């Protein structure tokens, strides 16, 4: 008894103060629309004022954070998105942790605050971190924040909170969502005449509360907010700071609380089994089309009307390291097809598949194992299908509906030609790796199949892909016995010829997979264009920094800007979050101490840039419209010895030759280099050679690395970088301007280094070489190769200026793809000629049947400059 009294005294003396401080601060400042943030000390928002620091976490107040657009959020329409007048809207950011890394839970229920007990969830946004919008009363919001500060906040399903921040929802957004919610409620609450195959009256409470509702966290829908439950500890519900409300302190042994808890559980169990109607299942069309019919004004917003979390669950067989590797392969290919801001992919373990209520939290089940499916697990999968579930089988043993899998050894692990029929009856032909099994109908009557089908282009026309409907609720599966999940570089690919066939079909492999996923109700829309980021001004050598700053001081405008016809660069010491970044106005941060990037290591670039002039001053951006425009206002002004280069991780408006666009995903080495060439010089008289030299520099930058000589990277005339003569891996774009006696030349270059999909990259070639030759060459980095390519280009230009074309053409011919190649002149029916080399100006020379060697020019098409070559008019 004495110990209990001491505990109560200590709690009353010290426990109230932090909680009371938080609650009083939120109450006092809530009307001012500032933002309250609970987070780790390292993640404190810029400019925010810290009100409380505790154990490495802080509570701070800063500028208002708003949410104006919920296009990327999945709404929980079983709880109307209506913010009560005295409530606070907030976003909780969490990460998903499994197994032994899971957030610890106390043995005493007195110390833990459950997130779902204190708020009403409104919407979620899957991804990393996982984000949830919710609303709560001032007291409950303060309670959540205090529990987070003291590491007592618990979320379900392995989610661990990392940050809580209050947000302001725009009135227009609230009105739109209120209308949308009211329109949906009537439909959602219609009783379902068909019972679920999974319902049992005495299952655990969490399997029934809010069944078919937004079970992202397994939370229970709340009818009341802001009231204290009798079983909540007073320490968490303390109403200090002037409040006259008082609550008794109840302990876990309190008979009154236990009685209330037991009666509540029994009531909920009864209601769950008998009184709460199931949500209607209408899977006659995709989820997107259902949403369109019920809410045509939604304008692209993804509304999860089933209430299910937007999860894709991947089952890869028994729990082992091999299964984990398969999961990573499947996850990687799916993440390339669907928007990971809209869906989240989870590994469905065998134990969870058998025991957990995963069907209520699954939009798509992917079965990707050749292991036999146990009878218990098979029944689980079939029950999911009967409830309207969607299944994708990837070379798995799972089948149903009278179809049987038949082994065909001659096909196993071989590359075959597949003909795939899409839902619009169009066909896609591609090379694909076969599993060695085919689908055959059983002895029953002929089944009604869906439109998606795939068969081999062989005598038997073996059936490899089938779409099989199931049940009356719209359940269906697409089952495949070709390896859509495996990349061409998979260890199962045996020969170089197979690798080439699969890589050349890689884009079509993704096309087939996206068609299947779309048919199964997922959205494969392109990801949202990333937001533009500021530029950073960096120097490759320390000694050039001071002259650069002096030059800028003399040439920037009164507001620190340098303008050109295309954009304005505004030089600033730092870039606050409120500074707007647009394609026409981009801030340039000059404080190099603040620079860091996962995708560009300045030290690696510095160590590998061995030039006298090129690439010394760097403008770097994570995301920019196009590097070709960044140097526009500087190219004629900045001293030539400073050697400007613009480098980006991603471009939103990448440019190719003519009107072509250039895709610039993460993993592509993207740069624009400024060089100047005297008109009266060897290269100045042959400017077309610049693009050839840049292409050659990239190839030589890789193949001159010790051990990498045989990596099959080549040049294709006039400006492409190729893998062998099969696939494009990069390209060059040159813009030149003659001012007086000098050419000012912008050389744009992009080549794939680490981005394997959807085509091929340099590290793919390295991995394939290692596999074929049992070598251990290391993968390469974009920053490393950009520095080496710029260094090589400077050496090639120096050689050209000294010796003319003859100084570089032997190396160019060593790496080009055209030796002995035949092309047609004029059109597809034109005369056949053989390519023999380049003339003195850098144009192709061909050998005609009569024995004459002539120069040919491109006809101007932007697709393939080797097509429709024409003879120039003789002067």
Image (tube, rainbow, N blue to C red):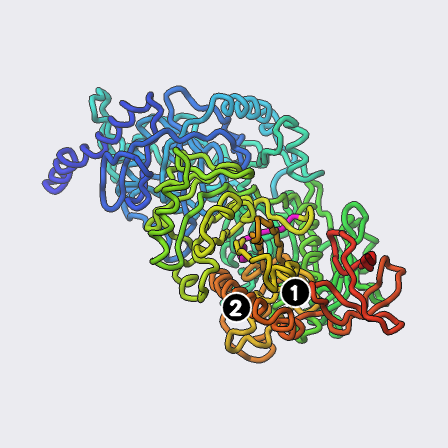
Q: Is residue 600 visible?
A: no
Q: Please name the residue shown 47% across and 49% down the image.
A: 622
Q: Please name the residue shown 81% across and 57% down the image.
A: 875
Q: Please name the residue shown 60% across and 67% down the image.
A: 696
In-front residue for pair 122/388: 122
In-front residue for pair 455/862: 862
Spot occupied by residue 605 in the image (x, y as percentages of width and height)? 43, 61
Spatial CA distance of label 2 from label 1 is: 22 Å
Q: Quarter holding the N terminus?
A: top left
Spot occupied by residue 178 in the image (x, y as percentages of width and height)? 53, 23
Q: Is residue 350 visible?
A: yes
Tell me: 179 left or right of 31.
right
Q: Please name the residue shown 32% across and 48% down the image.
A: 105
670 falls in the magenta region: yes
454 falls in the magenta region: no
The earlier-in-sequence mark between 2 and 1 is: 1
Spot occupied by residue 239 in the image (x, y as percentages of width and height)? 24, 26
Spot occupied by residue 548 in the image (x, y as percentages of width and height)? 38, 50
| Mark 1 lies on residue | 722
The residues colored magenta run 661-671
Tell me: 448 left or right of 352.
right
- Check disc 2 and report its element: helix, strand or loop: helix
Label 2 CA crowd tier, 10 Å (few <14, some 14–19, many 20+)? some
In-front residue for pair 858/23: 858
- Marking on residue 241: none
| Mark 2 lies on residue | 795
585, above or below 773, in the image: above
- Check disc 1 and report its element: helix, strand or loop: strand
Q: Main secondary structure of the magenta part?
A: loop
Label 1 CA crowd tier, 10 Å (few <14, some 14–19, many 20+)? many
Where, by quadrant of the figure, is residue 793 drawn? bottom right
Tell me: 251 left or right of 471.
left
């Amino acid at each position: 008894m004495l110990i209990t009294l001491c505990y109560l005294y200590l709690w009353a003396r010290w426990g109230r103060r932090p909680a009371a401080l938080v609650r009083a601060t939120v109450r006092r400042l809530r009307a001012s629309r500032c933002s309250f943030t609970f987070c780790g000390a390292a993640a404190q928002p810029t400019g925010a004022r810290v009100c409380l620091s505790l154990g490495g976490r802080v509570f701070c107040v800063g500028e208002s954070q708003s949410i104006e657009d919920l296009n990327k959020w999945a709404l929980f329409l079983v709880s109307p998105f209506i913010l009560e007048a005295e409530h606070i809207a907030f976003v909780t950011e969490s990460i998903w942790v499994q197994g032994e890394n899971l957030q610890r839970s106390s043995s005493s229920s007195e110390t833990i605050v459950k997130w779902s007990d204190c708020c009403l969830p409104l919407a979620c946004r899957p991804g990393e971190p996982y984000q949830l919008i919710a609303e709560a009363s001032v007291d409950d919001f303060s309670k959540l924040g205090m529990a987070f500060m003291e590491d007592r906040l618990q979320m379900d399903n392995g989610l661990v909170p990392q940050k809580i921040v209050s947000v302001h929802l725009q009135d227009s957004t609230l009105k739109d969502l209120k209308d949308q919610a009211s329109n949906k409620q009537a439909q959602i609450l219609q009783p379902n005449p068909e019972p679920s195959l999974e319902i049992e009256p005495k299952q655990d409470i969490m399997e029934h509360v809010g069944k078919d509702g937004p079970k992202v966290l397994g939370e229970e829908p709340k009818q009341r907010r802001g009231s204290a439950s009798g079983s909540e500890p007073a320490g968490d519900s303390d109403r200090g700071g002037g409040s006259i409300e008082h609550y008794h302190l109840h302990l876990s042994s309190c008979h009154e609380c236990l009685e209330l808890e037991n009666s509540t559980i029994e009531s909920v169990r009864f209601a769950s089994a008998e009184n709460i109607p199931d949500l209607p299942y209408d899977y006659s069309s995709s989820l997107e089309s259902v949403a369109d019919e019920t809410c045509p004004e939604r304008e692209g917003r993804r509304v999860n009307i089933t209430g299910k979390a937007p999860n894709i669950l991947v089952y890869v067989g028994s729990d082992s390291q091999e299964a984990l590797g398969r999961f990573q392969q499947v996850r990687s290919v799916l993440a390339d097809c669907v928007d990971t801001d809209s869906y989240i992919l989870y590994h469905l373990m065998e134990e969870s598949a058998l025991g957990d209520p995963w069907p209520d939290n699954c939009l798509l089940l992917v079965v990707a194992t050749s292991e036999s499916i146990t009878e218990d697990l098979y029944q689980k999968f079939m029950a999911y299908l009967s409830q309207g579930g969607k299944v994708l089988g990837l070379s798995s043993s799972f089948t149903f509906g009278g179809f049987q899998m038949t082994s065909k050894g001659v096909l196993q692990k071989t590359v075959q030609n597949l003909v795939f029929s899409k839902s619009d009856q169009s066909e896609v032909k591609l090379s694909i790796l076969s599993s060695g099994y085919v689908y055959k109908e059983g002895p029953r009557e002929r089944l009604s199949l869906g439109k998606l089908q795939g068969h081999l282009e062989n005598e038997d026309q073996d059936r490899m892909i089938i779409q099989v409907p199931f049940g009356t609720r719209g359940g269906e599966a697409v089952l495949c016995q070709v390896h859509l999940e495996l990349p061409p570089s998979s260890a199962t690919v045996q020969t170089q010829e197979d690798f080439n066939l699969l890589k050349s079909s890689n884009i079509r492999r993704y096309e087939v997979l996206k068609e299947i996923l779309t048919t199964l109700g997922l959205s494969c829309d392109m990801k949202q264009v990333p937001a533009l980021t500021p530029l950073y001004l960096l120097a490759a050598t320390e000694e050039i920094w001071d002259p650069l700053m002096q030059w800028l001081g003399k040439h920037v405008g009164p507001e620190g800007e340098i303008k050109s016809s295309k954009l304005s660069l505004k030089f600033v010491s730092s870039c606050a979050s409120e500074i707007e970044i647009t394609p026409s106005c981009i801030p340039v941060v000059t404080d190099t101490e603040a620079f860091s990037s996962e995708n560009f290591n300045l030290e690696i670039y510095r160590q590998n840039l061995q030039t006298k002039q090129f690439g010394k001053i760097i403008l770097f951006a994570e995301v920019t419209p196009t590097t070709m425009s960044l140097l526009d206002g500087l190219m004629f002004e900045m001293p030539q010895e400073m050697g400007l280069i613009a480098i980006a991780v991603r471009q939103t408006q990448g440019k190719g030759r003519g009107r072509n666009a250039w895709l610039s995903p993460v993993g592509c080495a993207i740069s624009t280099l400024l060089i100047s060439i005297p008109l009266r010089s060897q290269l100045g008289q042959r400017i077309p050679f610049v693009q050839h030299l840049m292409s050659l520099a990239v190839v030589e930058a890789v193949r001159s690395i010790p051990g990498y000589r045989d990596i099959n990277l080549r040049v294709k005339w006039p400006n492409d970088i190729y893998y062998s003569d099969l696939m494009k891996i990069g390209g060059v774009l040159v813009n030149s301007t003659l001012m007086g006696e000098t050419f000012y030349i912008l050389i744009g270059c992009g080549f794939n280094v680490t981005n394997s999909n959807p085509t091929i990259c340099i590290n793919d070639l390295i991995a394939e070489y290692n596999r074929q030759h049992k070598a251990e060459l290391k993968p390469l980095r974009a920053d490393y190769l950009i520095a080496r390519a710029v260094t090589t280009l400077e050496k090639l230009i120096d050689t050209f200026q000294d010796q003319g074309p003859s100084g570089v053409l032997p190396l160019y011919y060593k790496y080009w793809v055209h030796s002995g190649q035949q092309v047609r002149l004029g059109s597809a029916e034109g005369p056949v000629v053989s390519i023999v080399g380049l003339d003195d100006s850098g144009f192709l020379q061909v050998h005609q049947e009569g024995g004459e060697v002539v120069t040919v020019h491109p006809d101007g098409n932007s697709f393939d400059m080797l097509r429709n070559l024409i003879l120039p008019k003789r002067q």
